[in-house]
Image (spheres, coloured by chain):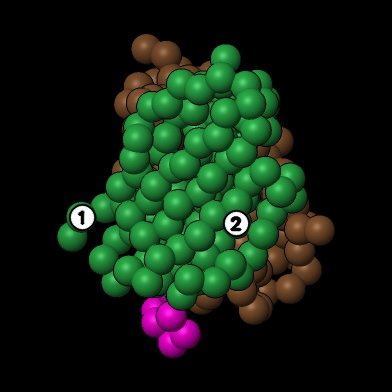
Amino acid sequence: AQSVSQHNHHVILSEAASLELGCNYSYGGTVNLFWYVQYPGQHLQLLLKYFSGDPLVKGIKGFEAEFIKSKFSFNLRKPSVQWSDTAEYFCAVMRNSGNTPLVFGKGTRLSVIA
Amino acid sequence: KAGVTQTPRYLIKTRGQQVTLSCSPISGHRSVSWYQQTPGQGLQFLFEYFSETQRNKGNFPGRFSGRQFSNSRSEMNVSTLELGDSALYLCASSLAGRGAKNYNEQFFGPGTRLTVL
C-alpha cells in the first residue's frame, strides 16, 4: 500500500532560520504531490503542489518544494521562517492513475520562536 | 466562490449513539472525500464519493458510512459511536472531472469536531 513518511514530528526554529521538512513516499508510479498547512484554529490550506514539469515548485508565503523522483522525496523548504509560520505541515501524495485517494503523512508541527 | 462548508462544527455524543455529519462542496465540484484527523494518526482517508457513487474507501469499519446527493452534497454517518471515534472529521472537494486541469486538487472544509463521551 502507498504510504507517506514525514520524518520530523516536531521542529522548533528561531525566526529567520532556514526550514526543510522531509517527505518520502512509497509508490513507484507517477504521482501528484502536495504540501498542506494547518495554522492553529484554521482549516487545511494548500501550500503548493507538483503535477508535472519543473521539479522545483514555488508556493505561497515563500515556500518551495523539490521533487526528486529517484529519492521518492518532496521536501518542503523556506529560506527564512517567521513566527507566523507556526503551524502543522502535511505532505500528501496521490497516484496519477485511476481514481485513487490522497494519502497524507502524519504531519510535522513547526514552532517558530522569537 | 464559497468554500467547502461543514455542519455542525462541533458535536458531543455518548458511546453507542450515532451521528450524521454534512458537507457542501465548492460549487461545480463533483468529488467529495472524507478524512478523520487525530493527533496520533494524522489524516486518515475514510471514503470518496463522485457522482453519488462511492469511488474509494479507506480502512475503517462498516460503522462508518456515507452518501452523496445529486447536488454533490455529502453526508457521513457513524453508528454505535466509540470513544476512539473522537476526532476532527474533514471533508474535501475537488473537480475530479476528466480533462479538467488540476482535477484532483482538493479543497478542505473547516471540519466537524466530534467528541464521544
Judge from the rendering whether residue B42 lies leftward or rightward of residue A56; answer left or right: right
Instruction: Please state the chain letter of the residue tagged with numbered disc 1 in the rendered image.
Output: B
**Subunit of label 2:** B
Q: What residue would you read off at disc 2? A: B47
The chain drawn green is chain what? B
Q: Which residues are magenta?
A: B97-104
**Any mark on residue A8, and which?**
none
**Mark 1, residues whose alpha carbon is within 10 Å: few (<14), some, or many (≥20)?**
few
Return the x and y of residue A45 as percentages of the image width and height. 38, 46
In this view, B33 is above or below A37: below
Verify whether residue B41 appears in magenta: no
**Relative to B34, does residue A42 appear above or below in the rendering?**
above
Q: Nearer the viewer, mark 2 or mark 1?
A: 2
Q: Which mark is residue B2?
A: 1
> Chain drawn brown, letter?
A
Dot 1: element? loop
Figure quadrant of the N terminus of chain B: bottom left
Residue B103 magenta: yes
- Residue type for callout 2: Phe
Image coordinates of residue A72 in percent, x first then y, are 73, 59
